[in-house]
Image (spheres, rainbow, N blue to C red):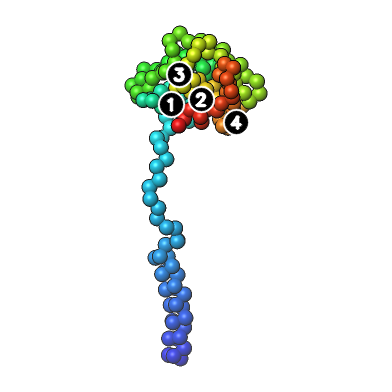
């Protein structure tokens, strides 16, 4: 009987050791380098996203107010950054006293600023209007076309480079 209990211990020990070895080796996921995902989002998770300028690029600022249409979002943008947003370094490239007409036709927003704008100022308007229309209609921002005056349709991502 002594021989059979030794075989029984060996038969039990082998699966237990194999399982312990597998656990010690890990699950097979290989380590990776750090992946840069950019800056964290600013502002509340819900609300309206406005596009201002930081350095020579567009940057977002969140404002309270879910479901604002492009016309109301552009009106907020034209007021400029708040004190807190200015303290974060946000500015506006939009001319003072600019007025912009906003019209919506399906998935297209038409903006008529009434004066020539820099590319950065145009980007502020395009991205703010596109984000607001997308949030209100449930579309992805990339699906919203924006026409500035009588120009060709454009999308927000064209200004984010």
- Alpha-carbon neighbours of circle 4 within 10 Å: few (<14), some, or many (≥20)? some
Q: Which class describes the residues within 10 Å of circle 3: few (<14), some (14-19), or many (20+)?
A: few
Q: Quadrant of residue 94?
A: top left
Q: Position of residue 107 (x, y in %)?
A: 63, 25
Q: Are marks 1 and 2 in contact (CB under 8 Å)?
A: yes
- The answer to which of marks 2 and 4 sits earlier in the sequence is 2
Residue 65 visible in the snapshot = no
Q: CA distance from mark 1 to mark 2?
A: 9 Å
Q: Give how far apart the Cα atoms at labels 4 and 1 are.
A: 19 Å
Question: Total of numbered circles in the picture?
Answer: 4
Residue 133: x percent and y percent?
A: 58, 24
Mark sitting on residue 58? 1
Q: Secondary structure at mark 4?
A: helix
Alpha carbons under labels 2 and 3: distance apart = 14 Å
- Determine which of the numbered discs, if any, sits on residue 118 in the image: 3
Horizontal and vertical percent position of residue 29:
44, 58
Position of residue 123 measured from the top left corner of the image (x, y, whole percent): 48, 23
Q: Which residue is mark 2?
A: 127
Residue shown at 41% from the left, 23% from the top: 53
In terms of depth relative to the viewer, which is nearer, 52 or 43?
52
- Secondary structure beneath disc 1? strand
Report the Cα–Cα distance between label 3 and label 4: 24 Å
Occupied quadrant, residue 90:
top left
Q: Which residue is mark 4?
A: 143
């Amino acid at each position: 009987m002594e021989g059979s209990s030794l075989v029984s211990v060996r038969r039990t020990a082998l699966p237990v050791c194999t399982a312990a070895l597998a656990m010690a080796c890990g699950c097979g996921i290989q380590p990776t380098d750090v992946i840069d995902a950019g800056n964290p989002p600013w502002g509340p998770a819900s609300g309206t996203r406005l596009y201002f300028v930081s350095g020579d690029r567009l940057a977002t600022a969140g404002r309270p107010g879910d479901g604002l249409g492009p016309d109301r979002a552009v009106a907020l943008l034209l007021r400029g950054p708040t004190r807190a947003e200015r303290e974060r370094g946000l500015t506006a490239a939009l001319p003072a006293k600019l007025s912009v007409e906003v019209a919506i036709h399906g998935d297209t927003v038409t903006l008529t600023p009434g004066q020539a704008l820099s590319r950065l100022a145009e980007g502020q308007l395009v991205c703010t209007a596109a984000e607001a229309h997308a949030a209100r209609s449930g579309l992805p921002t990339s699906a919203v076309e924006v026409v500035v005056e009588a120009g060709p349709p454009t999308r927000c991502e064209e200004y984010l480079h």
